[in-house]
Image: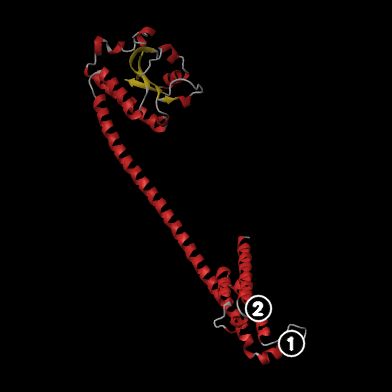
């Protein structure tokens, strides 16, 4: 639609220019001047809108030129002059009259076609340039993705290196010869690797009930509230690491990690709160490893004194502690 509108305005401008030329220029100039002034208008029309505008401008110019030539040789516009016999008589008087109109048409078409050809070539070059720019943008995006993947890979390598160092430090903490230091190391590992925000470690009795709060991070939770949770009951029953997805109850701890010593459930790690991104299967596997490692470390401590434990407790009395009061837990 816009192209037709542009061609209409070009045709209108051409007509106005030709009318102004025929009005203000003498007839002698319009019939004898070489090159003819009409070529200016023909070139403008052909260059502005292509071959069809050039042919249209050439046709109008040819018609005006023939009219002016009729007046120049003394012919009048009547039915006899406008007939074929009259036109042939005019050519006998003015034999070169048809050269200029023919040249107007040829120039208009050739220049317009040249303009159209260059326009097509330019459009093809623009399409190739856009295609090259698109390929360049895709290459840039691919390069950015490759750089991001490289940075992520480097981060993973560095993260794995840091994790190995932390695991080494964890192994040193868990190889301590003190129950207090072992559980303190366990809490440090939970904070370091899982960014645990709230957790508790409870000592259990022989019935799988809470006997003592050994250590906690963040706000402590009353033992009776923990034992009423279905996740606690299922963990005590199964004797393995479970998460909140293993029970229908939505509220409560996220993970419960039992610690076994000599095939007895000695303690329970209860993770109440940690970042959402850390709640995944990898964390569950890591907690299982920590539980096994902690149980092995506790057995190593107890194996050094097979008859007695810390604070003078016998191994047979390991699970005979009474449950502490709620006030003691809140300390």
Name above or below for residue 209 compared with residue 280. Answer: above
Could you tell me residue 114's position as x and y percent? 53, 74
Quarter of the image that includes the C terminus: top left
The answer to which image quadrant residue 176 occupies is: top left
Residue at disc 2, secondary structure? helix
Q: Number of numbered discs present?
A: 2
Please say if the residues under marks 1 and 2 sit with CB atoms less than 8 Å apart. Answer: no
Q: Residue at x 31, y 10 (%)?
A: 317
Could you tell me residue 185's position as x and y percent? 28, 23
The answer to which image quadrant residue 113 occupies is: bottom right
Foreground residue among 316 and 80: 80
Quarter of the image that includes the N terminus: bottom right
**32 left or right of 174?**
right
Check disc 1: other Cα within 10 Å, few if <14, some if 14-19, many if 20+.
few
Residue at disc 1, secondary structure? helix
Q: Disc 2 designates what residue?
A: 64
Q: Residue at x 59, y 81 (%)?
A: 29
Q: Residue at x 34, y 21 (%)?
A: 260
- Disc 1 to disc 2, C-alpha distance: 18 Å
**244 left or right of 174?**
right
User: Colour scheme in the image?
Assistant: secondary structure
Name above or below for residue 251 compared with residue 116. Answer: above
**312 left or right of 55?**
left
Mark 1 or mark 2: which comes first in sequence?
Answer: 2
Q: Disc 1 designates what residue?
A: 84
Could you tell me residue 272's position as x and y percent? 41, 21
In this view of the protein, can residue 62 be seen by the observer?
A: yes
Residue that extends furthest to the bottom in the rendered view of this protein: 92
């Amino acid at each position: 639609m816009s192209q037709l509108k542009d061609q209409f305005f070009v045709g209108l401008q051409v007509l106005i220019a030709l009318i102004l030329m025929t009005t203000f220029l003498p007839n002698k100039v319009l019939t004898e001047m070489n090159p003819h002034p009409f070529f200016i208008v023909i070139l403008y029309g052909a260059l502005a809108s292509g071959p069809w505008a050039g042919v249209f401008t050439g046709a109008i110019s040819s018609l005006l030129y023939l009219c002016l030539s009729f007046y120049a040789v003394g012919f009048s516009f009547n039915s006899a002059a406008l007939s074929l016999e009259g036109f042939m008589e005019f050519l006998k008087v003015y034999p070169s009259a048809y050269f200029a109109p023919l040249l107007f048409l040829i120039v208009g078409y050739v220049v317009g076609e040249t303009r159209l050809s260059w326009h097509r070539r330019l459009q093809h070059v623009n399409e190739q340039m856009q295609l090259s720019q698109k390929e360049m943008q895709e290459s840039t995006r691919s390069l950015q993705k490759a750089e991001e993947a490289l940075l992520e890979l480097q981060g993973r390598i560095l993260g794995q290196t840091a994790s190995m160092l932390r695991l080494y430090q964890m192994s040193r903490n868990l190889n301590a010869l003190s129950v207090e230091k072992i559980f303190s190391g366990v809490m440090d590992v939970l904070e370091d690797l899982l960014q645990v925000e709230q957790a508790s470690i409870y000592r259990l009795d022989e019935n799988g009930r809470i006997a003592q709060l050994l250590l906690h991070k963040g706000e402590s939770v009353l033992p009776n509230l923990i034992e009423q949770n279905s996740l606690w009951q299922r963990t005590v029953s199964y004797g393995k690491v479970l998460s909140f997805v293993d029970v229908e109850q939505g509220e409560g701890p996220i993970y419960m990690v039992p610690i076994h010593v000599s095939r007895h459930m000695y303690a329970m790690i209860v993770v109440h709160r940690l970042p959402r991104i850390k709640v995944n299967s990898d964390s569950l596997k890591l907690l299982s490893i920590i539980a096994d490692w902690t149980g092995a470390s506790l057995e190593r401590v107890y194996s050094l004194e097979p008859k007695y434990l810390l604070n003078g407790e016998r191994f047979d009395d390991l699970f005979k502690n009474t449950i502490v009061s709620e006030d003691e837990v809140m300390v």
